[in-house]
Image: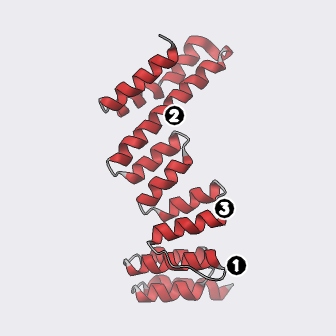
Amino acid sequence: MSSDERFEEAIAYITKYDLHSKALALWANEPEKVKVSYGSRFPLVAWITQFALQAIYDIYGDYLFDRREYYDAALAYLLGDKPRRAMTAYEKAHAWRELFALASKQKIESSELEDICDRVSGKLRLCFSTASRLICQFSLLAEYLSSHSRHLEAAQIALDYQQSVGQAVHILCRGSQFGEAFRLVSLFTLT
């Protein structure tokens, strides 16, 4: 039996018996064992160990995703070097900050970012001006968050992605976040 077959068998066993945490604990310590046993003359062995660890994080992400622990699944996918899957998990977790930060890091095109805004906000309305479509999508997302009493987050979107201090202040006042609204007005009238 080849080492690839054994590794696949180990992954199947880990998945079947929910041994993700124990497998991660074993594989996480493996790079030190590789260095002690083989020294630095065999970097391929260390790479295989890293590959195994990433594979275990990947199946752990799947396990968490199936249990609807989306935020933790996203973290596992990131550790498993699966940023697209992490974005899906962040989207399901309604973790828009992490989602847009990762989308920016992955250099997602604006059309795909617009689709993400649509899905996160639950809105499928079209914004007719193509030049400002992305800003319009962020506006819909801010509206969605505000309507779900997430005024601070909605104001953050208005400020960061729409560059609209007035809209952010309006959202904050609507949510009775007067202290933060006053802080924004003070901050942006000084500059």
Q: Can you tell which mark lies on residue 119?
A: none
Task: Give the mark nearest the N terminus, 1 or 3.
Answer: 3
Query: Is residue 17 visible to us here?
Result: yes
Q: Secondary structure at mark 2?
A: helix
Residue 56 x, y percent position in the rendering: 45, 32
Q: Residues within 10 Å of mark 3 (few under 14, many from 20)?
A: few
Q: Residues within 10 Å of mark 1 (few under 14, many from 20)?
A: few
Question: At x 58% / y 60%, what residue is drawn?
Answer: 101
**Along the horizontal axis of the image, is 151 left or right of 166?**
left
Task: Look at label 3 and name its amino acid.
Answer: Glu
- 98 in relation to 185, above or below: above
Q: Secondary structure at mark 1?
A: loop
Task: Look at label 2 and name its amino acid.
Answer: Gln
Q: Secondary structure at mark 3?
A: loop
Question: At x 63% / y 80%, what residue is drawn?
Answer: 163
Residue 28 x, y percent position in the rendering: 47, 29
Q: Can you tell which mark lies on residue 54?
A: 2
Residue 13 x, y percent position in the rendering: 35, 25
- 75 in relation to 37, above or below: below
Q: Which residue is mark 3?
A: 109
Q: Can you tell which mark lies on residue 131?
A: 1
Report how far apart the C-alphas of labels 1 and 3 lie in the structure.
Answer: 14 Å
